[in-house]
Image (tube, helix red, strand yellow):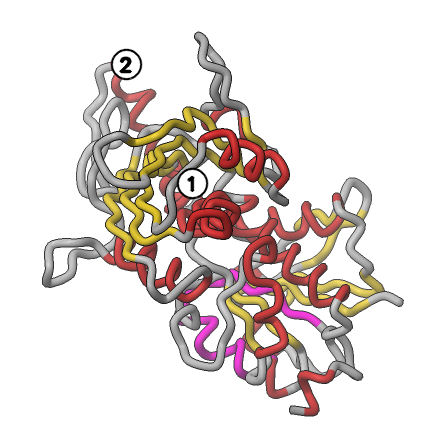
């Protein structure tokens, strides 16, 4: 059985990745449509190697009869059109931040909390922030073993997390620096080429940024409401691939060998922890990969029951498009997708 799938925001970086991954993973598609803003209507995008889709106008599209909507058009647009799709019994997986903390809308990383999909009573499922998604995949097996109480994380986030304009700015500034042209900061608050910026999203009253707040509240919603999270989120001059230095404090005594075994066997995780030159994974090595990579695993002797590790992942895949498609695959496995879905009978 195949499904009718609508991809909203299809001309953006995540939207194009959604189309690519749906084709790569042979998601059971009977029909597919690419949707975007009126100004993008009529453009063409690729679905797999052979099929080209002409983009249709999201604002006038009728979702009646469509099974699945994969949304990445921006939060303000999702706020309007995701509920319209859900009202037409088109189940929505939304990549924006708009619905993540809304009660009654599950926030899902399939390797961590796929069972929450059964609670999608409003017909909308939220995809978490890219930096949160890879972190909770790595934390889940450790939490199951040792029960994590506190997480301290510093992120090193690629410019693609800010979209195509962020990638363009890094490229333009890098080129300008070599030919001695003026460097302008438009997308970011300071020069990003050959620099790092400890500022992602807007500042909140307590001095943290909204990106840091997202990591804390989303981790609690996905993994455990009792976990405390302190995040420092930094933009770095890398095109694709988020990195994170993570330290955890646990309720139970930690055992390094057990932690290594748990990570090796965890879905979506690859442990590469060779204590030698190059025996770790960097962001450039994870581009195009589906898994979250963990390296530099070691006991933290400065706190009771502490572990520290390094974590990298392709933010356009696991941090966005791949996770959305994995949610769709989990919906199929749990028989929650389609016109006969029990979600529409709740």
Residue 84 among those drawn in magenta: yes
Q: Which residue is mark 2?
A: 179
Residue 124 is left or right of residue 297, and the answer is right
Q: Which residue is mark 1?
A: 160
Residue 41 is left or right of residue 27, and the answer is left
Residue 346 among those drawn in magenta: no
Residue 261 is left or right of residue 249, and the answer is right
Q: Residues within 10 Å of mark 2 (few under 14, many from 20)?
A: few
Upstream in the sequence, badge 2 or badge 1? Answer: 1
Image quadrant holding the C terminus, namely: bottom right
Image quadrant holding the N terminus, namely: bottom right
297 or 27: nearer the viewer:
297
Residue in view at x 33 percent, y 58 percent: 227
Horizontal and vertical percent for residue 44? 66, 52
257 or 116: nearer the viewer:
257
- Looking at the rendering, the stretch of residues picked out in magenta corresponds to 68-85
Q: Secondary structure at mark 1?
A: helix
The count of marks equals 2
Residue 215 is left or right of residue 262, and the answer is left
- The quadrant in which residue 56 appears is bottom right
Relative vertical location of residue 86 with respect to residue 171 in this rendering, above or below: below
Q: Main secondary structure of the magenta part?
A: helix
Query: Do we see residue 287 in this rendering?
Result: no
- From mark 2 to mark 1, how far is it between C-alphas? 24 Å
Residue in view at x 58 percent, y 79 percent: 119
Horizontal and vertical percent for residue 181? 23, 21
Residue in view at x 22 percent, y 15 percent: 180
Horizontal and vertical percent for residue 215? 34, 54
């Amino acid at each position: 059985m195949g499904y009718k799938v609508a991809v909203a925001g299809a001309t953006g970086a995540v939207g194009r990745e959604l189309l690519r991954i749906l084709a790569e993973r042979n998601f059971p598609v009977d029909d597919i449509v690419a949707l975007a803003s009126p100004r993008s209507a009529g453009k063409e995008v690729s679905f797999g190697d052979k099929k080209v889709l002409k983009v249709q106008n999201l604002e006038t599209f009728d979702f009646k009869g469509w099974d699945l909507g994969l949304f990445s058009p921006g939060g303000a647009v999702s706020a309007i059109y995701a509920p319209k799709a859900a009202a037409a019994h088109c189940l929505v997986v939304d990549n924006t931040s708009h619905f993540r903390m809304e009660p009654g809308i599950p926030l899902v990383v399939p390797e961590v909390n796929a069972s929450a999909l059964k609670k999608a009573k409003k017909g909308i499922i939220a995809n978490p922030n890219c930096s949160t998604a890879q972190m909770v995949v790595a934390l889940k097996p450790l939490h199951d073993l040792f029960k994590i109480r506190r997480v301290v994380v510093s992120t090193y986030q690629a410019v693609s997390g800010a979209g195509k304009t962020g990638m363009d700015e890094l490229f333009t500034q890098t080129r300008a620096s070599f030919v001695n042209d003026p460097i302008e900061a438009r997308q970011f608050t300071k020069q990003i080429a050959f620099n790092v910026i400890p500022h992602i999203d807007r500042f909140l009253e307590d001095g943290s940024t909204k990106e840091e707040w997202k990591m804390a509240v989303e981790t609690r919603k996905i993994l455990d409401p009792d976990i405390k999270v302190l995040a420092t989120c930094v933009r770095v001059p890398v095109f694709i691939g988020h990195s994170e230095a993570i330290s955890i404090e646990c309720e139970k005594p930690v055992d390094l060998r057990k932690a290594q075994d748990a990570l090796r066997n965890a879905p979506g995780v690859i442990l590469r922890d060779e204590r030698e030159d190059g025996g770790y994974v960097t962001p450039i090595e994870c581009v195009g990969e589906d898994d979250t990579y963990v390296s530099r695993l070691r006991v933290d002797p400065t706190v009771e029951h502490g572990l520290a590790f390094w974590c990298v992942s392709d933010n356009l895949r696991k941090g966005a498009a791949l996770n959305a498609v994995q949610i769709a695959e989990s919906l199929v496995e749990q028989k929650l997708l389609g016109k006969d879905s029990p979600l529409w009978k709740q």
